[in-house]
């Protein structure tokens, strides 16, 4: 086994293990901290894939913004230190069924996929690829319409958040 | 390679040859060299803190017309060593009801998040831990870990003051991250690269001259990001006792303290890199080690201004702090970013000489700054300033006294 494979296994175990802890942990804040570790594991996998940009964006967006907001909200809404309610609600059998179905179908798809043995081509510095990505996102014959629609969606979400937060007594 | 001209590269090459001579494979040599580099840069930062604490006390003392530490060693230089030894011997008290793992992890992450920033700082033209092509984004990403450490400390301490302090801190850090990133993007636009060393190399005219408004925005928002005066709300002694580290004692408290000092210094170093040209200076091509000297001189100049702010400004209130960010710094940063991006594109397309480009950017920056000040003045003239304290209310009298 090469060093890269060993590292991949380590990061995969860390990611999956902490993802498991997210759903089994009793305290909400600790679950959020486990989620951060899982997201770090994904960032490390991006580094192994030689896309440092995605790894850094993963940390900026998911850990720096989303996970911090999770923790912030969880701290504000509950008695965060002694949170020992039931962990599942009545919908858990349906959720378990759907989860199992998705897992089985994914496993079935991957078992029929033959490209596992193909070694990845050697990648150079990813700066040119990054610039191509940036150009493709705004060029009219590539992804400009999905990109702009995503922007409009975000603006709509911001306006909605502003409206919800405006307050009734103004 | 001449030892005197560039000792860092010389030592690195010597070590590499030594390790190869011992028969290690190339991969292991790189691994060992990186590991050694991490140890050296990290220890350098941590040892530097001992000096920084002495400097801070000495400078603060001079601002307040005192002498400062002057008993232990020449000019009191060894005072901090005594303090360090003292803090090592202190007892670790773990209060009841804390979340032990998170509680002990928080100070480690607090220091680690700052040390991680040093990985992309270029000390000389050649001495840089990792010249990432997304270096500036890396700085932003690692900054988020510091916020995380404070949240963890505040929550796990099982103390209401700690939690309140953590809330304040996170509100402040998350808010001020926005203008800081906007200001960070200006050097990226001007130099056309996200690599930190590339930004230094692009500054044939330092960016403080090219875009003083961006430098101002970055400096103010990074002061808030490190929680220095006038934005040290996170440890408002009069309101929340000590903030997020109230339940920490001994070395664990010391680590938060170290992290805070090192963060202040690191932010000064970042300012020196992004806006003052980092290691650039006279004679660096012949003697790269001079770059380290220039870099440190610039960094300490910025750090002096940080200390100057700390000793002379009062603390702002939390509503003022948030108003200042969302109503002034963020809009100005957005406008400056859009205008700079358009101008830079025009300059790149029309291929004007450098001095024209510099003057255009400088004029725009000053114009936006001037317009902002004028708008603030006009608004203040229209609407009187909010009273900082409540108006005195009429004295209440019992009803029989008024009837009589």
Image (spheres, rainbow, N blue to C red):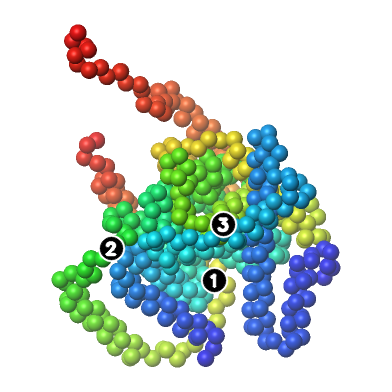
Chain letter of disc 3 in the image: B
Residue furthest out toward the top: B404
What residue is drawn where x is 76% and y is 80%? Answer: B17
Spatial separation of the CA atoms under disc 2 and disc 3: 31 Å
In the displayed structure image, the side of residue B72 where residue B145 appears, left or right: left
Spatial separation of the CA atoms under disc 3 and disc 1: 40 Å
Q: Report the front residue among B113 and A165.
A: B113
Quadrant containing the C terminus of chain B in the rendered view: top left
Give whichever of discs 1 and 2 has the lower sequence position. Answer: 2
Judging by the rendered image, the residue that carries numbered circle 2 is: A83
Query: Mark 1 touching mark 2, by CB under 8 A?
Result: no
What residue is drawn where x is 68% and y is 55%? Answer: B82
Spatial separation of the CA atoms under disc 1 and disc 2: 45 Å
Q: Report the front residue among A83 and B159.
A: B159
Judging by the rendered image, the residue that carries numbered circle 3 is: B254
Mark 3 packing: few (<14 Cα in 10 Å), some, or many (20+)? some
Of marks 1 and 2, the one in the foreground: 2
Of marks 3 and 1, the one in the foreground: 3
Chain letter of disc 2 in the image: A
Q: Secondary structure at mark 3?
A: helix
Query: Mark 3 touching mark 1, by CB under 8 A?
Result: no
Q: Report the front residue among B31 and B195.
A: B31
Q: Secondary structure at mark 1?
A: loop
Q: Quadrant of residue B33?
A: bottom right
Q: Tell me residue A137's x, y (percent).
A: 42, 63
């Amino acid at each position: 086994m090469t060093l890269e494979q060993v590292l991949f296994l380590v990061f995969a175990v860390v990611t999956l293990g902490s993802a498991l802890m997210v759903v089994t942990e009793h305290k909400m804040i600790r679950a959020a901290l486990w989620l951060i570790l899982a997201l770090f594991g994904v960032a490390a996998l991006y580094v192994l894939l030689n896309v440092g940009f995605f790894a850094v964006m993963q940390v900026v967006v998911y850990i720096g913004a989303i996970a911090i907001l999770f923790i912030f909200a969880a701290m504000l809404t509950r008695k965060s230190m002694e949170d020992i309610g039931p962990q599942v609600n009545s919908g858990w059998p349906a959720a378990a069924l759907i989860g199992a179905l998705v897992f089985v179908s994914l496993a079935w798809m991957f078992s029929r996929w033959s490209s596992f043995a193909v070694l990845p081509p050697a990648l150079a510095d990813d700066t040119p690829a990054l610039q191509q990505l940036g150009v493709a996102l705004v060029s009219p014959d590539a992804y400009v319409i999905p990109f702009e629609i995503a922007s409009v969606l975000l603006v709509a979400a911001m306006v909605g958040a502003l409206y919800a937060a405006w307050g009734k007594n103004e | 390679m001449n030892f005197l001209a560039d000792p860092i590269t010389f030592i690195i090459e010597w070590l590499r040859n030594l390790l190869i001579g011992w028969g290690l494979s190339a991969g292991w040599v790189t691994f060992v060299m990186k590991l050694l580099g991490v140890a050296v840069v990290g220890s350098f930062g941590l040892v530097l803190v001992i000096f920084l604490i002495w400097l801070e006390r000495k400078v603060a003392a001079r601002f307040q017309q005192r002498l400062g530490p002057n008993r232990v060693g020449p000019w009191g230089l060894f005072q901090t060593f005594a303090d360090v030894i003292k803090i090592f011997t202190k007892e670790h008290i773990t209060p009841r009801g804390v979340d032990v793992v998170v509680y002990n992890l928080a100070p480690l992450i607090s220091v680690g998040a700052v040390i991680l920033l040093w990985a992309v700082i270029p000390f000389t033209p050649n001495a840089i831990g990792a010249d990432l092509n997304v270096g500036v984004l890396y700085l932003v990403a690692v900054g988020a870990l510091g916020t995380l450490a404070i949240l963890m400390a505040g929550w796990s301490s099982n103390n209401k003051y700690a939690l309140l302090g953590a809330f304040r801190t996170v509100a402040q850090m998350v808010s001020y991250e926005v203008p800081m990133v906007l200001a960070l993007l200006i050097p990226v636009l001007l130099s056309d690269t996200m690599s930190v060393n590339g930004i230094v190399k692009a500054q044939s005219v330092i960016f403080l001259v090219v875009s003083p408004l961006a430098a101002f925005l970055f400096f103010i928002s990074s002061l808030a990001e490190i929680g220095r005066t006038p934005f040290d709300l996170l440890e408002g002694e009069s309101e929340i006792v000590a903030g997020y580290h109230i339940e920490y004692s001994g070395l664990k408290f010391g680590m938060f303290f170290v992290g805070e000092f090192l963060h202040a210094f690191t932010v000064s170093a970042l300012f020196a890199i992004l806006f003052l040209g980092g290691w650039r200076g006279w004679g660096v091509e012949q003697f790269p080690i001079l770059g380290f000297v220039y870099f440190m001189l610039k960094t300490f100049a910025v750090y002096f201004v940080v200390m100057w702010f700390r000793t002379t400004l009062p603390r702002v209130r939390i509503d003022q702090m948030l108003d200042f960010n969302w109503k002034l710094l963020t809009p100005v940063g957005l406008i400056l970013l859009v205008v700079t991006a358009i101008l830079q594109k025009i300059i790149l397309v029309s291929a004007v000489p450098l001095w024209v480009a510099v003057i255009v950017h400088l004029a725009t920056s000053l114009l936006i700054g001037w317009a902002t000040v004028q708008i603030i003045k006009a608004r203040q003239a229209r609407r009187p300033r909010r009273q900082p304290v409540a108006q005195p209310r009429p004295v209440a009298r019992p009803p029989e006294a008024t009837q009589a």
